[in-house]
Image (cartoon, coloured by chain):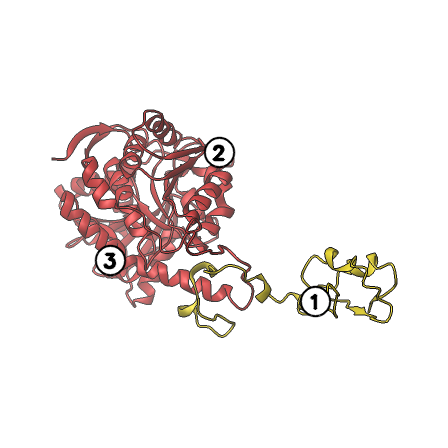
Amino acid sequence: MSEINSTTPWQDLTIGGNIYEAGNAKNFKTGDWRSVKPIYLSEKCKQCGLCFPVCPDDAIPVNKEQKREDFNYDMCKGCGVCAKVCPFGAIEMQ
Amino acid sequence: MSIRERLSGNEAAAIAMKQINPDVVAAFPITPSTEIPQYFSSFVSNGAVDTEFVAVESEHSAMSACIGAEAAGARAMTATSSNGLSLMWEMIYIASSLRLPIVMSLVNRAVSGPLNIHNDHSDAMGVRDSGWIQLFSENNQEAYDNLVMAHRIAEHKDVLLPLMVCQDGFITSHSIENIELIEDDLVKKFVGTYKPEHYLLNDKEPMAVGPLDLQAYLFEHKRQQAEAMRNAKKVVLEVSKEFEKMTGRKYGFFEEYKLEDAEIAIVCMNSTAGTTKYTVDKLREKGIKAGLLKIRMFRPFPTEEVAKALSHLKAVAVLDKADSLNGAGGALFEDVISSMYVSNIHVPTVNYVYGIGGRDTKADDIEKVYNDLSEIVKTGNINNPYRYLGVRE
């Protein structure tokens, strides 16, 4: 499927906005919905692994060593669930 | 050889659906269209069709099931009337915006309230801007023929829009008339197999239907729908021409009845055209040059063609079987008037709202309209362009 973006004229869009490929939710950046932002305080983090399973999107990347990294704000809607479950105060909402 | 039969309008619609043999029919009974799914479900039980019949719990679900089926890659049909269509309303727009060529048999009935089960066109007029192609049918033969042509128009790659075939509730749906049916194998060949380019059940191409469509995209998708509606004009003519080759029955955007040399004319849709033809013949015997323009294709509206067809007249009456309750004219009137204005054609034109809630419209009523037109020609005075026919006052 060819690239479609907000400058594509109507003649070149698929009908009804159909998407003829799978696995494209990651292209939909929902981070701009956020009104508050989680800050990752790595010095307090014990890598307990409680935060990333509760993220409703894909905003907490986990690397090959099974360690969480800093937030991917493209996907973070600022819901604050991760901050709530963190037992060590390693996530602060601002 | 075609088959001569006598059928009601609902039977004719059901027989057309049987011959089309769609993959899915989802419908909910509502007067006066109830018989269509009723007859059709007996065809399913008897094994006359291979259709999956979905007995849904509401019209909203009927249209939803048709949308799901059509998106999956199946050919889907339904039938409804009046408030059934009202309950479908949300999904009516989804069907057209997702570009799913669903075909509906709409048996026109007044939308309540107060509660009324009889014929007018308020149901069809309520969805006139929803992006469905709308074909109107004078009699049982036309209701049948329009359905046979429907999928070819709706499924055309330049169109891909849903289509409804309208006929008048009770007046044609429950009246038995002579009809010429096409042989099963010819209908099958004419309609063809549905081969969508993209569909959900295609395991070679995963796809998403109906994604979020915000400020950056919805406008362009509506522009596409508008273009598809314009493209439908060409396709309607092509399919009608092919249909004529098969049956000898000629269809266009509209039918001009003794219009060519007419001085005064009525514009109307569905069964009233039959009454009007009878009246035209009667007036012609008296030397009155009366004519009729019967609209078959209301959506897309054939603007230039209508304006041209009416351009030589001295006075025109547009008959609306639904009151738009807008302080101005009915929907058909407004479309005719704007078509003429844009084409820079000025003919004195008046609107009559008539036949609301099944109020009988007799030849005498139609004759009164022609008499009014003759008066307008004589005096040059329109007085009130927004008129009523047959209301007590």
Dot 3, how many residues are within 10 Å of its Cα: few (below 14), some (14-19), or many (20+)?
many
Q: Nearer the viewer, mark 3 or mark 2?
A: 2
Local crowd size for mark 2, using a 10 Å CA cut-off: few (<14), some (14–19), many (≥20)? some
Camera-side residue of B357 and A12 = A12
The chain drawn in red is B
- Going 32% across and 24% down the picture, which residue do you hit? B46
* Label of residue B56 in the image: 2
Q: Label 2 lies in what chain?
A: B
Of residue A48 and residue B71, the one placed in the foreground of this image is A48
**Which element carries disc 1, helix, strand or loop?**
loop
Residue under pointer 3:
B310
Q: Specify the amino acid type for callout 1.
A: Asn
Measured as percent of width and height from the top left, residue A58 is found at 67, 62
User: Horizontal and vertical percent for residue A78?
Assistant: 74, 64
Of the residues shown, which amino acid type is indicated by label 2? Answer: Val
B256 relative to B302 in the view: left or right: left
Q: What distance separates the C-alpha of mark 3 from that of mark 2?
A: 45 Å
- Measured from the top left, where is residue B294 in percent x and y? 26, 48
Tell me the number on the disc at residue B99.
Answer: none
Q: Which chain identifier belongs to the yellow chain?
A: A
Label 3 secondary element: helix
> Does mark 2 fall on the same chain as mark 1?
no
Q: Secondary structure at mark 2?
A: loop
Give residue A63's mark: 1
In the image, taking residue B237 as reference, residue B14 lies left or right, namely right
Give the letter of the chain under mark 1.
A
Q: Are marks 3 and 2 on the same chain?
A: yes
**For residue B282, side relative to residue B131 (left or right):** left
Q: Amino acid at mark 3?
A: Leu
Specify which label sits upstream in the sequence, 3 or 2.
2
Residue A38, above or below B200: below
